[in-house]
Image: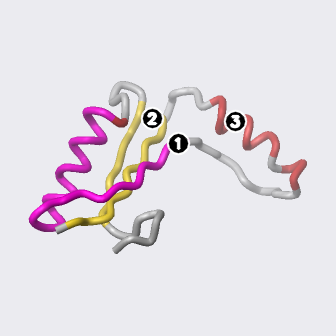
Amino acid sequence: MNFPVTVTVTLREGIADPEGATIERALPALGFEGVTHVRAGKSFHMMIDAVDEAGALEKATALAQRLLSNPVIENSSARVGDSAWGVA
């Protein structure tokens, strides 16, 4: 059975995030006041073939930790559910 999965990767707290800082500085000029603590990251959307939802989540978590993120400086999380493509 195929499950839509989203993996999100962000920098760990305490690691400098120049992209997030640049976005945060630009927001007031664009009319977005009161937005703080902006952190940039990456999002990966995929379909995973597994017996059940727990198996899909286990595969996605292992994939995130071994390939999609650098666990020294990044956090990763996986969730099963709606994909970016609307595939169920």
Q: Secondary structure at mark 2?
A: loop
**Position in image of residue 63 (x %, y %):** 25, 41
**Position in image of residue 37 (x %, y %):** 64, 46
With respect to residue 34, does 62 lie above or below? above
Q: Which residue is mark 3?
A: 21
Q: Residue 41: which numbered mark, if any?
A: 1
Q: Secondary structure at mark 1?
A: strand
Label 3 – label 2 distance at C-alpha: 14 Å
Could you tell which of marks 3 and 2 lies nearer the N-terminus? 2
Residues at badges 3 and 1 in contact (C-beta under 8 Å)?
no
Q: Quadrant of residue 88?
A: bottom left
Q: Secondary structure at mark 3?
A: helix
65 vs 37, left or right, is: left
Q: Residue at x 25, y 50 (%)?
A: 60
Q: Which residue is mark 2?
A: 12
Label 2 – label 1 distance at C-alpha: 10 Å
51 falls in the magenta region: yes
Could you tell which of marks 3 and 1 lies nearer the N-terminus? 3
With respect to residue 26, does 79 lie above or below? below
Image: magenta residue range: 41-67
* Mark 3 Cα-neighbour bin, 10 Å: few <14, some 14–19, many ≥20: some
Identify the image quadrant of the N terminus: bottom left
